[in-house]
Structures are given as structure tokens and as C-alpha cells.
Image (cartoon, coloured by chain):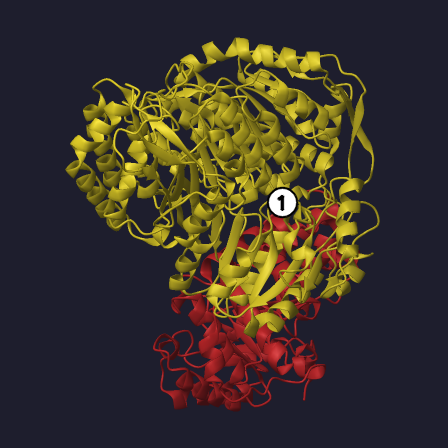
Amino acid sequence: MNTTLTHLPSVTLPRNDGMPLDLDWVASVQANTSAIERRAKTLPGRRSVKKDYQAAWLCKAVSCIDLTTLSGDDTAMRVRRLCAKAKQPVRADLLDQLDLPELTTGAVCVYHDMVATAVDGLDGTGIPVAAVSTGFPAGLSPLHLRLEEIRESVKAGATEIDIVISRRHALSGNWQALYDETRAMRDACGPAHMKAILATGELGTLRNVARASLVCMMAGSDFIKTSTGKEPVNATLPVTLTMIRAIRAYHARTGLMVGYKPAGGISKAKDALVYLSMIKDELGDRWLQPDLFRFGASSLLGDIERQLEHHLTGHYSAQYRHPIG
Amino acid sequence: MTVKEIFETMDYGPAPEDASEALAWIVDQGAAFGHFINGQFTEGRADFETKNPANGNVLATVTQATEAEVTAAVKAARAAQPKWAKDGHARAKVLYAIARLLQKHSRLFAVLETLDNGKPIRETRDIDVPLALRHFYYHAGMAQLMESELPDAAPLGVCGQIIPWNFPLLMLAWKIAPALAMGNTVVLKPAEYTPLTALLFAQICQEAGVPKGVVNIVTGDGAVGEMIVGSDVDKIAFTGSTSVGRMIREATAGSGKALTLELGGKSPYIIFDDADIDSAVEGLVDAIWFNQGQVCCAGSRLLVHEAMAEDVYARLKTRMQNLRVGDPLDKCIDVGAIVDPAQLAAIKAMVDANTDGDLFQTTAPDGCFFPPTLITGLHPADTLMQEEIFGPVLVATTFRTPSEAVQIANNTRYGLAASVWTENINLALDMAPQLASGIVWVNGTNMMDAAAGFGGVRESGFGREGGWEGLSGYTKPRSTPKALKPTVAMKGDSTPTDAIDRTAKLYIGGKQTRPDGGYSTPVFAKNGDLLGHVSLANRKDLRNAVEAANAAKGWSKTTGHLRAQILYYLAENLAARAPEFAARLDAMQGGKSGKAEVEASLKRLFTAAAWADKYDGQVHNVPMRGVAMAMKEPIGTIGILAPDEAPLLSLISLIAPALAMGNRVIALASSPFPLATTDLIQVLETSDIPAGTVNLLTGHAADIAKPMGGHMDIDAVWSFRDAATATTVERASASNLKRTWVNNGMATDWTQDLTKQVLLHATEVKNIWVPYGE
């Protein structure tokens, strides 16, 4: 077992092995959209993090980023460049001043074909490689191929697998099918940790988001994740609130901690702070570590780098002063 | 802590709002304030200090107004009023200018408010100030529309306005904006704890071009409030405690001053078993920990379905531990300082005195802070379930069924607001009309906007602030009333014209009953003939009538269509006996006007019947995805001291619209001419009007006015007798703060159709907020 597991829940927390599908619980779930939106809308006005605290929180956000490239034109060199950035996400001189020289991102997230390259690029760093699997992003390839893809990715060295759920099962209310399929994927993951992507932008209602969240946790997901980044609407605060409240309910019932990953649409340092405060207030401090929280983001890091330089110098920064990934 | 350490702890850290601008403003004013009278600030006297409750620092000294200063302010307002009332467009421009300036200086207002009051900057910045300026924008529009949309409305004149310390600027806006829009001028007194934003507002008035004398602000404590109440104003608008409201009601009784009261509350917050529990728990944060719970409409009484109670309490306790209590100028604080050590002591005393239930508290810093508190396992019989605490203290109990939830929710002297949490729209919309409150929030709490009226029922007061319904508190019908001439009974000798004794009985609960006292009085014709006797009702007959009326609650739940049918039928039956009624009226009153009076009465019945299913509510245009439904609800049981003059027409003009809206009535018939009313009993008996819906008494107003005014199970009293009766009714009405509508001894022309005025008094607007979205 390589050292990358230091990022994973199993080190300090019992892994979520799931539970039998509890349809009564799923059916009883409520999510009042207007009330959830109100909470989400007023939170940024209720929480504010300033000066050194803001710098520390932004560094925390960096440590939780799944630095991601998921493009048709990805090449090995492109992925290596990304890995280099994951190892040194913020300029060394800035990190030295912050006294956080070891800061890295949470993981690097790539397509299956790039897993081996990423593993090699991150060798010796402890940074895990996450692979998007299961016919990403639509999840409509044959099930046996999707399961096989997981196994291949794990074999190639991915220690985290981001799977996509079959939206059609959630939309048609076939929770058993969703459970069974997700369970099979979890089995295929073996020791690798599974992040279940709900594609919340395609689930229609927050109630469906809450139900799908519960079913995926019952099926043994280590993380639940909002989106592929390819849906028209990706991570939002109301969706986040709905999903983390499901995580909280699951924890209250089972004692197990499931992680959360918002993905897509979070590109500003300020937004990252709001997400972190929502996690802190709704789930608690324990969830503010990379073993239970990740940002699926590619452009967020650039904005954080500029904010950190501003913090340290008192001058607004420029993008070109920070190395690209 | 170093960045590295914070990286591990992930604490929030301090996020202070800069107060230097606001403090500099205070210093610029010499940190000593006078009043704002006739467009000028008076020289300040250091009569009392206003402090920052978060740290006890003195912010400035403020002046306690003298009688002469209050008089000068009222005089300035009086002089300015006629010209101010002339041009709605000019008023709109001024109100718009105020709104713009509030917006421009919004941060200064927010910081100053937080300094003076102790509430979190998050609230002043995101709620108080935006709502206040919204109120001025909204009412700029009302000033513009008054001429075209309210052609029959005239301003009241000078309004005395007394506001509390919990929302100093917002309450000022709620008072001043509608008053000014409708062409009134004002003398406003901010609370002694929190005068500063009102004084900054005075400066804004100077900048906005408010004509001198239109807005006057005098500072001081309750003694100054008393001076305003006793001064030469046309209206008192008060927001504050129920006990002070009661004193004002007594003090203004019979003065002819219009009155609106926005008082205390113990608002229920009801969570059903199908609610989104997490959202309901989060809602409680905004219900009871908003503004440290110092909110009249705070959801302070939690009612949870028995099946969910433990789950709700557990989640609530977890949530409470995340509430950040402390420096209100910190942008990351949820609960700030209590307004004053005296208020803190009052909260503490109430909580300490309670030995029932289970107490759960988080922590609060030393100083003028009180920790968020939850007391579960209480029952309606516990003091804390009944009394307003006005602090961050939530009390909780359970219920089994929706009807029990209604029963517990309504088991209170108050009736300001209510929250209902359920995902079942049938249940939500069934609960809303049943709750005794002026406001119902479905799956939400503390939603407020200028476009929707705010105000309560029962001892939470009367009048609405905001919306079209709020304007009636600042207008009166355009008319020039004359003094009412007494109507005297005819005299005669007691010789009966026929041998059969004719003593009309009282009509109570659908039955003709003998008076409790066993006395009667003769009624003579103009020519001195004895027409018959009528019973003399006393307070026990009134009591019985109230019991009957309250047993007839079903009438309020009938459809407008049914009530219209019954009123038409009543008209039909009266028409069948029109000549007999006309003759009776002529015999009692003399002259030949009886026929016309009966015909006019029939018209009034038709008009009331017509309105029964057409006096629609509104859906207000509030800034949210959802509807705010302004439903017109019946007042309940209305006691009417019907006029002495035009005995049939005036009675029907009043009771028909009241009935059409679903009220039950107890009317004292014209004392000199009661027989048309007692004849009406037979018509009522044959017209399908349910027993107890209409109760008719005869006798002397002097016997009935006081017990009627004071009866705590009557919801409104209307008096159209002499001025003394009006005074008696209004003074007695303080018992339960019932609505009153009195003539103050002025005459009413009953040949004019006043149905729309009556409808206004026969209904109360309930605003039901229903946010939606899936």
C-alpha cells in the first residue's frame, strides 16, 4: 500500500461500508427548496473570514482541491504539468512566508487513460490520483464495461474513483436499481475510495438530490459529489446544503462519516470560503479536512494564489505572477 | 494564532466592521443631541446618555423633551400639514429622495444602529436598513397614487408616533413613510435607548428637502411619550409593549385621536411531522435568535408534533451550539448584545423564575449578553408559555393533531404571527386561517416587506403597517362631520291603546328571552300613545348574548355565497312587511320618512349581500418567489351600540355588512325608537340566520356600554351614541385591546351608503406568506 492513503478516511475513520437500502427512510426525506435557498443565500452575509484567518482558510481550500483536467485533448505532458502544479500549488516563496511549505492539493483528477501518467507524475508525493470512471460523464455505457473501467483504473494506480450514477434510476424513482448499481461499483473499487457523482443539475429537484445522496451512501460511497462539471448547472450552495444535510443525517443514523465534493462552477477564492463555512457550520470542523472534503475545480487555485499574494504583500496580484498548472 | 495554527483549527477569527465613520459622525454632532423641530435641531441638553450595550461606552448625550418642546413640535407639524397634504406628486418626490439618501448612507445607518442597539451588523446591514429604505420607496409610490386610487381618503393631520428600541430605524420607516405618503405630518419619539438613527434620519430629511415641520423628532423616555399622547395630535401610532399600549388606549379614549397599536406577541412556531426538519430548525434561528429574540413577532413558542419532538430538539441543540454570540460589530456574529442591562435583567429574571421543563443553554460572553436558550417540556399552563420574554429564549411543547396544534397555538392573549412548517400544502393552507394571528408564514419566518401589512389581533394590537391595508391607519373618509344632536324619546301617558300587553323581548341565541333584570320601559308615539314596552337589558343579558355569539362561530366559516343568500332572503322577508315597518317608524319618530327608511334599509341589505362574496383579499407583490396572500377575515364577535336616530336604517347599515363578512353581532337597538328593531326579530327568525349570529338587546347605552367595551370575549365594539358613550367604550376596551369604531359624538348621515367603511371595520387583514419552489 502506498503512502497516498494518508489522505483517505480509512486512516483515522472507519470506512463507510454502506447499509441495506432503507426505502422508508428514502421516502421520508424532505427538502424545502425555498427554505434551503434562503439559508444558502444568507450564509455569505453571516460568515466572514479575514486577514490571517482568510489566508489559512484559503490554504485549507488548496489542500482540498482535486486538481482536475478532463478534456478530450489531454496529453501526457499536459497531465504531468498538472501534477507539478499539484505538488507545488502555490509559489514556494509564498508558502514559506505562510509557514506551510508542504502544502499540496488534495488529489489530481483525470480520465482513466491518464491515470498511469498521473501516478508516475506524483510518485513519492503522497498525493492520490483520482480517476473519473463509469462512462463519465453520462454513465450510459454498458454496466459491465463501467465496472471493468473501475477495475482497470484501480489497477492503473488510482486510489480514488469518481463514478457517475445513472440519473435515470433517480428520475424514475427506481432507488433499488440505483442502490444495486452503486453497490456493484463500490465492490469494483475495492480498496480505492469511491466518490459518487449525482449530477445534481439533472436530478430535477432538491428532494431527488437528498434521496439520491442517501441511497448512494447506503450503497457504500466514501464521498458524494455534486456534478461532473459537464452538466448545465454544477455545484450550487442550495445543492450543497441538501447533500451535506443528508451526510449529517447518515452520520447521525450510522455513526459513519461520508465526504462531500462540490464540483464545477467554484472559481473564486471568496466562493471557496463560503463553501468551507457552510461545511463548518452544518457538518462541523471534522469535515474540513481533505479526507472528507474536496473541491472539484480547475480555475479556483489561480484565484486563491492571487489572494494569498495580496495577503502577504498588501498589493493586488496578477495572474501571470503564478505558475500555471 | 499563526496561519499554520489556524490552518489546523479552522476558527473564524475576528471580522470587525469599521465603526470609525459612525463614531466620527457622532463627534461631528458634538456627541450631544437636541430635538429636530420645524426643520432645525434644537440646542442639546445632556439629560441622558445613550450607550453601546456591547461595551457600555457612552455614545452621546440626548435631550429629554419638555412639555413646551413637544408642544412646539406638534405646532410645527400642524402648521406644515395643510400644504404638505396638497400635492401627492411632490410628496412622492420627497419620499423618493429620502429612500435614495437612506440607500446612499446605508452603511452609516447600519453601523450607527448596531452601536446604539447592540444587534449584529449582519442584521442592520442586510435586514433593518434595506427594509427601511424599501418602505420609503414603496410609499413614495403610495403618495403618487393616493389621488387616483384613494379619492375618498383624507389625511388624518398630525400623527404622534412612538417607537421601540428593537428596530429603531425600521420602526421609524414603518411609521413615517405611510404617514407622510398620505399627507400627514409627524412628531416621532424614538426609544430612549436608541435615538441615534432617528437623529441621523432627521439630517437626511434636511438633505431630502422635507419641508420644515413635516417631520419632527423629539427624544426622551416614556414621560415624553405620555406628553405626545396628551398633545394636540390627530393620531397616535405606537409600537411597543402591550402594557404601555393599554395605557395609551385608556389615555386616548374619547379623545377622537385615531390609534394603531403594534404590541407584543408569543408567536407559535409549528413543526409538523412531514416538515423539512433541518430547514425548520434553521428557521428557528431566524425566528427566536434574530435580534437576540427582542422581536415582537419572534417565533418564541415552539410546537412540535409529538412523533418528531426528540429529533427536533436534538437537531436544534446542535444548531444552537454553532450560534456565535458576541461583538455585534463583528461580521461573523449571529447573536449580539441585549439592548440594555435592564432588559438583560428582565430576561434573566424570567428564565430564573422558571423551574419547569428542561433548560438548554449555550454560552455568551460576559457583559450585556444572554446565551441562546431552549426550554423543552413546557405546557401551556407554564408561565413561560404564556408571557413574552423578549429575549433569545425559546420554549417548546408538543401536540398530537393539527387541531390540537391550532388549539395550543391560539391559547394565548396575543395574536401577532405564526409559522407553520409542513410539506403538505393542504395542511398549511388549512392551518393558516385557523390561527389567531395577523401574519402566517408557511415554511418560513420573520418575512417582512413594505407591500404586505404587518400587525396583529387580540392583545398584539390593531392596525397594519405596510401594504394597501396599512394606509387606512393614516387616512380618514373625506367629510366634515357635525356634532350629533341628541335623539330624545317621545313622551306620553301610560294608557295602552289596546288591552293586550306588548313587551318586546330580547333576542339572544336565536330565542326571544326575558331580560335578566326583569324590567322594561314604555315606548311612546309622537302623539303620546303608548306603543308598547321594551325590555331593559343589563350586563348579564350582554354576557348571555356574547356566549351565544361565540357559540355561533360556524357563521364565520360559511361561504360568502351562503351569507349573501341569507341576507337577500332577509331583505325579501323585510320587504314583505315593508308597510308595517314604515308605519312603525312613523309612529315612533313622527313624520312620513318611514317608507324611505325601509326602502333604504332594503338597499343596504342588498349591498351587503352583494359584497358578501366580492370583498376580495389581495395577493401582494412582495420580493420573493411565492405569494403573500392578504386575506380579509371577519373580526369575530362585534358589539354594536347602534345609533338612536334612523333606528332601522342605521342598525341595518351596520349589522348587514358585519354579517356579510362573517361576523357575529350583538347590537343594542336605538334607545328612543327600539320597536323597529324588536319587530325585526321576527324577520330574523324566518330568514335562516343561525341562532346566535345576530343578538339584539334593548335598553340604555349607559347600562351596556361599559360591560360591552370591557368584555374580553368581544373582538370589536362600535359606538354611535354620544361622546360620553364613545369614551366609556374606548376606555373599557383596554381590557383586551379590542378594536373600536366610535363616532366621538359626531353625526353620521345614514341616508348615505357607508357600506365600504363598515366593511373596512368588519374585517381584518391576515397576510399569509407562502414561498414556493421545488
Q: Where B63 falls versus A64 (above or below)?
A: above
Q: Amino acid at mark 1?
A: Val
| Residue at image location 79% in from the left, 40% down from the top | B342
Q: How many numbered dots are placed on residues in this image? A: 1
Q: Where does residue A23 sit, x and y in percent of width and height?
A: 45, 83
Which hue is chain A drawn in? red
Relative horizontal placement of residue B604, taking residue B213 as reference (left or right): left
Pick whichever, B598 or B541, lies toward us: B541
| Residue at image location 73% in from the left, 64% down from the top | B356
Relative horizontal placement of residue B51, taking residue B616 as reference (left or right): right
| Residue at image location 40% in from the left, 34% down from the top | B468
Which hue is chain B drawn in? yellow
**Element marked by disc 1:** loop
Query: Quadrant where the C terminus of chain B lies?
Result: bottom left
| Residue at image location 58% in from the left, 33% down from the top | B171
Q: Where A107 falls versus A97 (above or below)?
A: below
Please indicate, yes or no, whether residue A71 appears anywhere in the rendered image: no
Q: Where does residue A301 sit, x and y in percent of width and height?
A: 60, 59
Residue B700: quarter of image: top left
Please indicate, yes or no, whether residue B690 appears anywhere in the rendered image: yes
Pick whichever, B640 or A306, lies toward us: B640
Q: Which residue is mark 1?
A: B295
Q: Where does residue B388 sit, x and y in percent of width and height?
A: 66, 49
Query: Quadrant where the N terminus of chain B lies?
Result: bottom right
Relative horizontal placement of residue A63, taking residue B555 as reference (left or right): right
In the rendered structure, the residue with mark 1 lies on which chain? B
Pick whichever, B12 or B53, lies toward us: B53
Q: Where A323 falls versus B765 (above or below)?
A: below
Using a 10 Å C-alpha cutoff, classify the residue at mark 1 as few (fewer than 14 neighbours), some (14 to 19) or many (20 or more).
many
Q: Where does residue B469 sit, x and y in percent of width and height?
A: 42, 35
